[in-house]
Amino acid sequence: MITIIDYKAGNVGSLKNAIESLGFSCQITSDPQKIGRAEKIIFPGQGRAGSAMKELRKRGIDKIIKKIKAPFLGICLGMQLLADYSVEDKTRGLAIIPGDVFKFGNGLRVPQIGWNSVRIKNNPPLFRGINNNEYFYFIHSYYFAAPEQYVVGRTDYGIGFVSALQKDNYYAVQFHPEKSGEAGLKLLRNFCLL
């Protein structure tokens, strides 16, 4: 079963619908014990880093996430919270994937909203069967600056930024696969089959 973490920071309903449309069973929970026992975990997110981390700590989910050995997918804010630090609300993250989160500058319009391509590197399992430079749907004002060894996807928006990461069993994407048409569903299927 696929477990989606609910911490009041994401549209979990559309993600659940996407997973179930692929034929996989799914549960939404904020129970740390259920999250800790899950076969696969999706960590979505929209909103602000500070309030999201506060909610995770209040529920004890932050400690559980750090111990997970099952396949884990962070999406959008769920990706950014895996970092050491975010300039948004001066927030300490979960420190699972090294790096920091910064706001787009240089006069770029934020949030970046819409379709943008992802340059895939190192043939990661999450992107199996997905074309290089495939388009996915983004909506974000911040980006994760991570060491190159963890980067599996890059995108351009005024600057080149990291749009997909992998460290051990932790996978993360800046875009919303559940809103990204066939390519997004294929990525979610790849995750569910890990």
Image (cartoon, grey):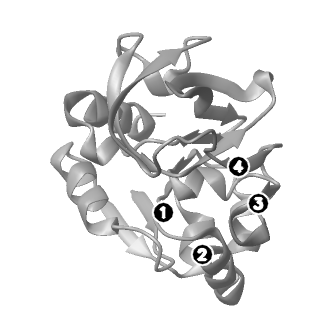
The three-letter amino acid code for the residue at tag 4 is Phe
Are the residues tagged 1 and 2 within 8 Å (C-beta)? yes
Where is residue 71 drawn, in percent x and y?
58, 44
Q: Residue at x 20, y 35 (%)?
A: 181
Quarter residue 91 falls in: bottom right
Query: Left of 138 or right of it: where is 23?
Result: left
Q: Residue at x 42, y 17 (%)?
A: 128
Of labels 1 and 3, earlier in sequence is: 1
Query: Left of 20 or right of it: where is 166?
Result: right
Residue neighbourhood size for the residue with mark 4, other residues' Cα within 10 Å, grouped as few (<14), some (14–19), many (≥20) = some
Number of the label disc, if any, that sits on residue 67: 3
User: 178 above or below 193?
Assistant: below
According to the image, label 2 marks what residue? 52
The residue nearer to you, when weighing 1 against 105, is: 105
How far apart marks 1 and 3 lie (CA) works out to 20 Å
Where is residue 157 drawn, in percent x and y?
50, 30
Are the residues tagged 4 and 3 within 8 Å (C-beta)? no
According to the image, label 4 marks what residue? 102
Of labels 4 and 3, earlier in sequence is: 3
**Disc 2 or disc 4, which is closer to the eye?**
4
**Disc 4 or disc 3, which is closer to the eye?**
4
The three-letter amino acid code for the residue at tag 3 is Lys
The residue nearer to you, when weighing 47 against 75, is: 47
Give the residue at the far left of this rendering.
Answer: 21
